[in-house]
Amino acid sequence: MLNMEKKTILVFGTGHLAYRLKAKLTAGNYQLVHATLDEINGASQSVSLLENLQQFIRQLDVDAIKMVYLLDEKDEVNLQLIIALISLYPDISIAASLFNENLIPHLQAQHSNVTIFNPAKIAAPHFVAALYQPLERKIETGVISNTPKTSLKKKDTLIQKLLLAFIGLIVVAVLFFHFYEKLSWIDSFYFVIVTVATVGYGDINLAASSPVSKLFGIILILSSTFFIWMIFSLTIDRVLKKRIMLALGRKKYHCKDHIILCGLGRLGYFIAEELLQKGEKLIIIEQHEDGRYLDYFRQLGAEVYIGDGRLSKVLDDTNVAQARALISVINDDSINLEIGLNSRSFQPGIRLILRIFDEQMAKKIKEYLNIHLTLSASDIADEKFYEILK
């Protein structure tokens, strides 16, 4: 049995939010007990979560527990623990993290001692507010980067070249039949078009012509067939590819003063929703074309580009060079940083708002890499959870 001179705070969960709150509680001189679901289940031979949880808490003295925080990164873990705790100890105070907004009102309506927050919803307004804050650092315009400011893909001019060669063939053929076969200009042009189109009316033919004219006619038929087939095939291929790219959300944008949001996960969802409510022009870059929120935000008026925000072509296509700001909230610090630095090669003074989990690392990145605004969603959310104790 632990010595309970102070009210005990019990924290369940792993991840940035749980560890940040632990540090804050320790600094506040609270008596802290931290555990994970695996530790609870692994401490007993029972397969029942209720029995394992009851055995774990019995060692702590329930009356000494002031608050139980359920802060696992997985909603299903927190939900299991909420149900288990309220069934075992109906009067215990619980503060939990849930990203599923649909569950929160139902759970809180049934249990007045349960407080549930969505960390993403708490943090999102801070990221949006950062768009309108004065920049704390001077913008440097002399950024050196190996990333080109133009698309790496060279423009395909094969169709244009084939078309010019085909027109050249027709011109040469018209000249040949006019001067060699003594046809009038209009008859010569008519005969070449009929031959190229393989219509073959028979009103003008080369049956009585010289072998040279017949050989030239054969070359004209074969060459024109090749050109028509190639031009038609490449044109259809280009049209289909363009339609597929548009269907997948990949197209070249020319808008200005817009916001680019990279990542449409838990946090990105609320940021995008708030930006659209404020009337901002928004382009969302999402790597996965089967994202569950893509159609929803398209209906709200956002543009969606399917691609990797780290790639120069993606940033170029979304016109980052003329964007007002770029917000990257992908669930990986290094990717957010790479997207931010790559975007500066297009526009050195672009306002960057990056999600960095570690608050200390966020400050260092801001200082040493001259990133204007770096925010830790966990650092924002843990304040809200900590305030419950006051």
Image (cartoon, rainbow, N blue to C red):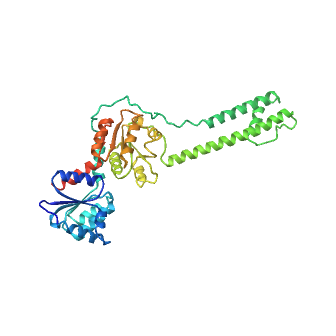
Q: Of residues 277 and 145, which is closer to you in this image?
A: 145
Q: Image height check: is 33 above or below 53?
A: above
Give how far across and how far down residue 237 sits, in percent: 60, 45
Kindly give the residue lying farthest to the left in the view shown.
Answer: 5
Q: In which quarter of the image is residue 261?
A: top left
Q: Residue at x 28, y 40 (%)?
A: 363
Q: Residue at x 41, y 55 (%)?
A: 292
Q: Quadrant of the C terminus?
A: bottom left
Residue 131 in view of the camera: no
Give how far across and how far down residue 60 sits, in percent: 18, 65
Query: In the rendered view, does 91 fall on the left or right side of 78?
Result: left
Q: Of residues 359 and 244, which is closer to you in this image?
A: 359
Query: In the rendered view, does 191 fall on the left or right side of 275?
Result: right
Give how far across and how far down residue 162 sits, in percent: 66, 36
Kindly give the residue lying farthest to the top in the view shown.
Answer: 179
Q: Residue at x 33, y 41 (%)?
A: 353
Give how far across and how far down residue 186 sits, in percent: 76, 31
Residue 138 in view of the camera: yes
Q: Quadrant of residue 94?
A: bottom left
Q: Residue at x 78, y 33 (%)?
A: 187
